[in-house]
Each structure stands twice: as C-alpha cells, then as structure tokens.
Image (cartoon, helix red, strand yellow):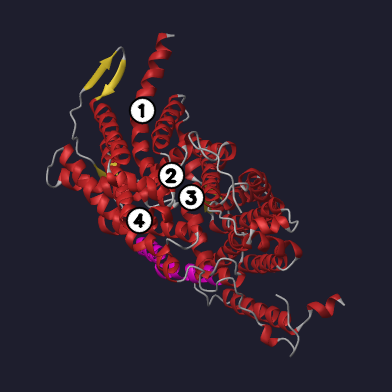
Amino acid sequence: MGHILQQFSQQAVNGLSLGSIYALIALGYTMVYGIVKLINFAHGDVMMVGAYLGWIVTTQLHWSFLPALFFAMVVSAILGMLIERIAYKPLRNASRIAALITAIGVSLFLEYGGMLLVTAQVRTYPPVFPETVYNVAGIMFKYGDVVMLVTSVVLMFLLQFTVQYTKVGKSMRAVSFDKDAALLMGVNVNNTISATFAIGSALAGAAGVLMGVYFNTIDPLMGIIPGLKAFVAAVLGGIGIIPGAMVGGLVLGLTEAFVSGLGASTWRDAVAFLILILVLIIKPTGLFGKNVREKV
Amino acid sequence: MIVSKWLNRKNVFVLLGATLFYAVIQGSILTDILPPFYKLNLILICIYIILATSLNLINGITGQFSIGHAGFMAIGAYLSAIITAKLHGPLALGLLVGALVAAAVGFLVGLPTLRLKGDYLAIATLGVGEVVRIVFLNTEYVGGAAGFTLSSKITWSWSFWLMVLSIVVMHNLINSTHGRACISVRENEIAAEAMGINTTKYKVLAFTFGAFFAGLAGGIYANYMYIIQPMTFSFLKSFDILVMVVLGGLGSLTGSIFGAIFMTVISALLAGFPEWRMVITASLLVVMMVFRPIGLMGTKEFSLNFLGKKGERNVT
C-alpha cells in the first residue's frame, strides 16, 4: 500500500512539473483567444524559438539560467508582436477560418524556417542545474523540477497581477469584453492586442527554456505537440479564462503522468486528445466557462 | 430522355479529353518513355485530387472546418492494406472496404462533433485524426511505428479512373438537392434551419462522404506505395490537403483539383529541399489569406459551358 502511495505521489510530482509547462503555454493561447478570438497555432512554435534562444545563450555565451530565461522571454515577446502585426492584423475583420488558416501558415513557417536556419538536428541543452535530487519521504524531487514549478508559479502570479491591477491589464480585459466599447472609451485597441501577444509569447518563450532544460533535447518541430496539448489545456479550463488555463494545464500534466505511470506511455498523446473531444462534446465552454446563448 | 440529357456536348468533350489524356500517359508508360518519377507524381496527383475534392466537400461546400482528413486517409490505407496484403483479397474489395470503414468512422465521429462550430470543430477533428494515427501506431498487427509493407498493385489506370469516378460522384452530389442543402448550411446555418433543412443531417452527410473518398484515396496510396507508416498520416498531411483546398478556393471543385495539381507539382520540383517546400507552402498560405482569402477560384467553377449549344445554359 505504501509503495503504491509513493509511486502515486512520484507521478503527481512529475505531472505537476510537466503540467506547469503546459499551463504556461496555455496561458498565452487563452489570452490571445480571449482578446482576438483566434487560435494562435503558431504559439507552440514561439515556444520552440524560445527554447532555441535559451540554448544559444547558454551554450555559446555561457549565460546562467535566469538571464537566459529573461532573454528568451524578451525576444519571444518581440517575435509575438511581429507575428501579430504582419500576419494577423490585416485579417482582424476577415472570417475566423481565414485567420485560423493564417495561423497554421505562420506555424508551418516558423517550424520549417527554423529548420532551414538551425537544421533539423536535435540539440542538447547544457546542464544548467546541479543534479541534486531531494528525497522527501521516498518521493524524488529533482532540482530542475523545483525550479520549474517555482518559475511557473512566479510567472503566473506576475501575469495575474498584471491582468488585474495594471493599466495594460485593465485595457486587456476591456478589449476582450467588448472591443468596440473599449475603443469608444479611449482604449488603444491595437496596442492592447500587441501587448497581449507580447505577454503570451514571453510566457511561451519561458516555457520553451524550461522545456529544453526539462527534456534536455530540442528540435525545430518540438513545439507542435506541446502546443496542441496546451491548447487542450486551455479548452479544458475554458478558453479565454486565465485561471482556467492554469488548472487545465496542471490537470493535463497530471493525467499524462498517471497514464505513463500505468505503463501506457505510447497512448499519452491519444489521452490528451480524447480529453479534448470529451470536453468539447460534454461542456464546450470548459470547466470554468459560462454558457453563452447564441443570438441571431 | 436520360441518354440525350447526359450526352450533351460538354460531357462528351470532358470525357473525350479525359480518355485522350489517359491514353497518352498509358501509352508512354507501356512504351517505357515516361520516367518512373513522372509516373509516381501523376499517381500522387490523382490521389491528392481525390483528397482535396473530398475535403472541399466538408470545408468548402458545407462550410465546416475539418483538419483531420489524414485520419480518414489512414483508416482507408490500413484497412485496404490489411485486406490485400494480410488476407490476400482482391484490390477492389480492399479499396471498397477501406473507404466504407472510413465513411463509417466519419459518420460516428461526425454525429457528436459536428455540433461544434468553427475553431472548436477544427480542433476536435485534428484530435480525431491524431487519435486514429496513435491507434495504428500502437497496433502491432499492422507493424506499429515501423510500418506495414505490401506489394504495389495500383496502376495508372486504377488511380486515374478512380479519380474520375470520384470527381463525377462529387460533382453530381454537389449539384443535387443534397448538395444545395449543404451549400445553404454554409451560407447561413440558422436561415437554412428556418427553411426546414435538417442541418445536422447534411453536415454529417458531407462529413461521411468526405471520409469515404479520403479512405478511398488512402487505399490507393497504400496499395501503390509499398509501405505505409503512421507518421505519413500525421496532421501535417491534413494541412497539406487543406492548403490545396484553400489555394484553389473553398467551395470550388475545379479549384481543389487545380490546388492538388499545383501543390503536388511544387513538391515534386522541390523534392530535394523539403524545408524550402514547407516554407514556400506556409508563406503562400499566409500571403493568400492576407491578399485573397477566398482562394484563386473563390466559389466559382471553371466550366466548359461555352461549348454548350447557344441559349442552352447547363446548370452546373
């Protein structure tokens, strides 16, 4: 019995660290969806770019973890803003499907453009953390697990603070509630949307560095599957709702860890998509969503 | 008179043109003039035309948004491969069973998911496609990740005439009562429902037909390619098909055909540079959406109406 409990807790720890990465990516998805009603397929690829930025500065310039994280966040934020200005802004009044197809295009562009730049070769992250393992009552905490959880939680608190108490956050909430009314009240909608993309992409960049540190290897297509899963997490929590994305990410991470723990790790990806389909069929607005009646 | 209705000048011209094209290619294959690389790409064009036109049925004609088409292709490919290679059944039976099972899965998946709209439907279909791929990946009977080898039974004749048959069936479906109902769902779902159209029925109908032809194309692909692997049917394949449909124009049958030919030729030309191929595809997609979101043809069809008798308007 004790053995099972111990294994259970061990998988919970693994799930939480993986889930916190999903949550960080899911936050970007959910913020962008909340404000422009667009599934930003390229979000996972911004995470990939973040991972490469972190890799370049840690291997070539021998930076330590925190400056590398910060650098990746800043450059990813700029990339996110550029993507929005170049690809999505001209389509703001086009059909949703046109915007979605554009997002797929941007995603493919980043993946294969990245492949041209850095080649498809798998790169290894340098060991930025000591190999310390803490043993608390038989449950192994790697140093990296702890840093990852702490980093994610700090970033989520910063985000929550920004959205709730700063001027940018207030205008973001106003624009997502009613774009036209916000415009009439003097909110600069374009800058607010840019800010949303910047914040979301910065979080994705941070997630990319954490991902690289956690899995050790990075490649130009690494963003696809975590990106899709983060989207599942965002839908699970209710897309457009920030606390929902955090909870959704953690729930997804835990589920995957338990599925792997049961010895069915090759089915892990299928489980994530089955969750998605079930959520969409049973409660499309997600765990935290409210039902909105369709108006003609 | 059924015969005289079908035997108008336009249909005869199209049929003659198709037969002539088929005969020229068949002749050059039989006399070994045609290099194998060209033959491969001609058959691939046939396969992609079936895939693109069938996705057009869902995304263009009925206005839904599926990005899981590769999943149905995978079902058709694996099922037909099991029939022809494992059970040593005839090729036609394999193709038929593959397509029918894909259609059945499309029906079962379509019933619940087609209640979803727009982005949600897109993601759900993507999820379905990936689940199908993972199921095959984990099935040892069909070789798992390593893939499934089989002999190549498909000839140019098979692929060409199956493509022609598919286009004819889809063309007639689009121009039937059912097709018009599907178009009304695309134009305005609520208005269509108010006019007494069972929108769910037509959405599922389009989805099932689309899945059927995707399964057929998958069967042709499997029985031509010697080997099928789960990775072939990842959602990148779905995106490839989507690009063809979008490029040609959502809702245009001839547009999809053109898109399929164009993209297959581009991939053949850039066969040595797969990254460049994807970068060009992606840029094309973005530029297209920004400057001409309806695609090259929009919802229009390229038609040979000018060949009809003067004053006679063929309803196409």
Q: Which secondary structure type mostly characterizes the magenta part of the structure? A: helix
Compared to A26, does B26 lie above or below? below
Category of crowding for the residue at label 4, using alpha-carbon neighbours closer than 10 angstroms: few (below 14), some (14–19), many (at least 20): many
Numbered range of the magenta stretch: B258-284
Q: CA distance from mark 1 to mark 2?
A: 18 Å
At horizontal 69% and vertical 81% (from top left) the residue drawn is B16
Category of crowding for the residue at label 3, using alpha-carbon neighbours closer than 10 angstroms: few (below 14), some (14–19), many (at least 20): many
Compared to A199, does A282 lie above or below? above
Question: What's the residue type where badge 4 is placed?
Answer: Val
Disc 3 target residue: B234
Disc 1 target residue: A16
- The chain ID associated with circle 4 is A
- The chain ID associated with circle 2 is A
Q: Is residue B39 visible?
A: no
> At which x and y percent is residue A147?
24, 29
Q: CA distance from mark 3 to mark 2?
A: 13 Å
Disc 2 target residue: A228
Instruction: Answer with left or right where residue A63 lies relative to residue A284.
Output: left
